């Protein structure tokens, strides 16, 4: 298939470059060596964009050194950053090359967890990346014996409901969660509070 595609591409490029222009008065003669170089350049581009696999999105646990880049990413998607833990424990980052394109954090509060900073860059949405980050965050909570996970959201209540969370009243929120900066100061009173019980 690759060889066939290359032949078709090369033949079409050669025809396009070698066909005399209709207006000979302004024709520019291209030396054969330049034609060959142009064909090879186009062929390389054809292979790169059509046959070479895309670089995979990598999920890694965050380290303190990545804090500046994470803050920059979260600010671009309008999520709070002033209360991020200094060691970024419980945070997972998605990288496309050297660029952060997704994040999810799990703040541990005894046997309860606060899911926060779940975001995916607009350029990488609709690729199940949010689902992958969400799953890693829940696995992190389970590995630390968390029994209940809470979250506060302004815009993604339907998404989290589809993934097992249920909306609750603010009066039902335990003290550990209500005393966090996310709950008490950063998120508006109109934000939806949700809860999931882990198995």
Image (cartoon, rainbow, N blue to C red):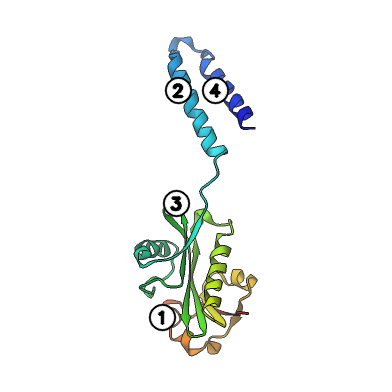
Q: Quadrant of residue 132?
A: bottom right
Q: Which corner quadrant of the image does residue 81 belong to?
A: bottom left
Q: Are marks 2 and 1 in contact (CB under 8 Å)?
A: no
Give the class, few, some or many, for how many residues have Cα within 10 Å of label 1's Cα (few <14, many ≥20): some
**Residue pictured at 64% horizontal, 70% vertical:** 162
Q: Which-is-in-front pick, marks 2 and 4? A: 2
Dot label at residue 181 = 1
159 over 198 or under it: above or below: above
- Mark with earlier residue (4, 1): 4
Residue drawn 48% across and 10% down? 24
Instruction: Determine whether label 3 and label 2 are within 8 Å by CB.
Output: no
- The residues bearing labels 4 and 1 have C-alpha atoms spaced at a distance of 61 Å
Q: Is residue 52 above or below residue 35?
A: below
Name the front one of labels 3 and 1. Answer: 3
In the displayed structure, does residue 62 sit left or right of residue 153? left
Q: What label sits on residue 13 in the rendered view? A: 4
The alpha-carbon separation of the residues under discs 3 and 1 comes to 32 Å
The disc, 3 or 1, on the residue closer to the chain's N-terminal end is 3
The crowd level at tag 3 (other Cα within 10 Å; few <14, some 14-19, many 20+) is: few
Residue 125 in picture, x, y percent from top left: 55, 57
Q: Tag 1's secondary structure? A: helix
Q: Nearer the viewer, mark 2 or mark 1?
A: 2
Expressed as whole percent of the image width and height from the top left, the position of residue 42 reads 50, 29
Q: Secondary structure at mark 3?
A: loop
Question: Which residue position holds label 2?
Answer: 37
Q: Mark 2 or mark 3, which is nearer the start of the sequence?
A: 2
């Amino acid at each position: 298939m690759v060889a066939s595609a290359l032949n078709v591409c090369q033949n079409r490029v050669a025809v396009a470059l070698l066909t005399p222009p209709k207006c000979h008065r302004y024709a520019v003669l291209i030396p054969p060596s330049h034609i060959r170089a142009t064909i090879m350049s186009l062929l390389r581009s054809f292979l790169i964009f059509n046959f070479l696999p895309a670089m995979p999105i990598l999920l890694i646990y965050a380290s303190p050194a990545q804090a500046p880049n994470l803050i920059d990413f979260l600010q671009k998607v309008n999520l709070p950053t002033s209360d991020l833990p200094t060691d970024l424990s419980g945070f997972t980052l998605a990288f496309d090359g050297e660029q952060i394109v997704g994040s999810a954090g799990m703040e541990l509060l005894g046997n309860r967890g606060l899911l926060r900073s779940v975001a995916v860059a607009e350029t990488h949405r609709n690729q199940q990346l949010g689902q992958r980050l969400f799953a890693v965050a829940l696995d992190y909570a389970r590995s630390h014996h968390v029994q209940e996970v809470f979250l506060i959201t302004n815009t993604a209540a339907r998404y989290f409901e589809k993934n097992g969370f249920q909306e609750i009243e603010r009066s039902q929120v335990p003290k550990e969660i209500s005393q966090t900066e996310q709950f008490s100061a950063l998120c508006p009173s109109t934000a939806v509070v949700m809860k999931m019980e882990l198995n």
